[in-house]
Image (cartoon, coloured by chain):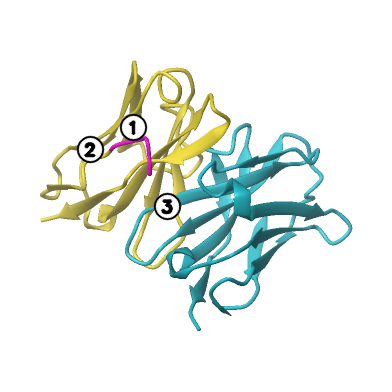
């Protein structure tokens, strides 16, 4: 059974960079046909796709976040990561890592989510 | 910011049929598959419908999806108390972006 687990700081200061890692177990991150993505949900609000990386390394980002987002993969550790720079309070959210099939809109496995608060 | 519009709420009594709409455009729903997710309180979303109308293994056949033009719908028949949750549609867009719908909270009266 595939499992995804987010890890990283739960508190980030404004203007700094938010960094999260997703560890994948029960399957290889190098498997073809899968995207590995990040999705967030501000408290009490809806879901927002942040971006995804294909197993080959191609990346796709939400246009509204593209200038601040970097997603990368470390196949040796079966992990992928999110970096979001110049954060503000509006970036406070539960961040989910996920596996997506065929297209980044099709998420079949989700991590449990991790709350990241942006505050000084 | 979402380009997929859903009604904020829907409700029904146990046993009733509830339908949730998802309105998009020709560049997303009109030319790509629609996916539906169920999010129970305090949990990660769960894939409910893929490729417009397909159910993953384990999803009851009370849940069904459909698509017509630039809109899609999720129907829940035989509504049960455990169906009380938030529901989101999602679609890939030809601009190479993924979008989630605005979300619909289903209440079982």
Q: Which residue corresponds to mark 2?
A: B77
Residue A93 makes an appearance in the image: no
| Quadrant showing the N terminus of chain A | bottom right
A53 is higher (above) or lower (below) than A110? above
Label whose residue precedes the other's in the sequence (2 or 1): 1
Q: Residue at coordinates 34% horizontally, 24% vertically from top-left?
A: B66
Is residue A17 rendered to the left or right of residue B52? right
Neighbour tally class for label 1: few under 14, some 14-19, many 20 plus, Cα within 10 Å: many
Q: Can you tell which of label 3 and label 1 is closer to the viewer?
A: 3
**Range of residues picked out in magenta:** B1-5
Q: Nearer the viewer, residue A91 or B103?
A: A91
Number of the label disc, if any, that sits on residue B35 = none
Q: Which residue corresponds to mark 3?
A: A47
Q: Which residue corresponds to mark 1?
A: B64
Q: Residue at coordinates 62% horizontally, 72% vertically from top-left?
A: A16
In the displayed orientation, state which residue is furthest to the bottom.
Answer: A120
């Amino acid at each position: 059974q595939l499992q995804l687990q987010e890890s990283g700081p739960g508190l980030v200061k404004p203007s700094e960079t938010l960094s999260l890692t997703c560890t994948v177990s029960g399957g290889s991150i190098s498997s073809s046909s899968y995207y590995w993505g990040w999705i967030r949900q501000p408290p009490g609000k809806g879901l927002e796709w942040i971006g995804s990386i294909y197993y080959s390394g191609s990346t796709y980002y939400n246009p509204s976040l593209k200038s601040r987002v970097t997603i990368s993969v470390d196949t040796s550790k079966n992990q992928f990561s999110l970096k979001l720079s110049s954060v503000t309070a509006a970036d406070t959210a539960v961040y989910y890592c996920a596996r997506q099939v065929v297209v980044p809109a099709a998420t079949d496995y989700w991590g449990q989510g991790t709350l990241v608060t942006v505050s000084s | 910011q979402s380009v997929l519009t859903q009604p904020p709420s829907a409700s029904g009594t146990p046993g009733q049929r509830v339908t949730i709409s998802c309105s998009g455009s020709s560049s997303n729903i009109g030319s790509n598959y629609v996916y539906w997710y169920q999010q129970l309180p305090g949990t990660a979303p769960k894939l409910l419908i893929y490729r417009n109308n397909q159910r993953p293994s384990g999803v009851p056949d009370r849940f069904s999806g459909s698509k017509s033009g630039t809109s899609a719908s999720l129907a829940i028949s035989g509504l049960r108390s455990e169906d009380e949750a938030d529901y989101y549609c999602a679609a890939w867009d030809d601009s190479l972006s993924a979008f989630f719908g605005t979300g619909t909270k289903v209440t079982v009266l």
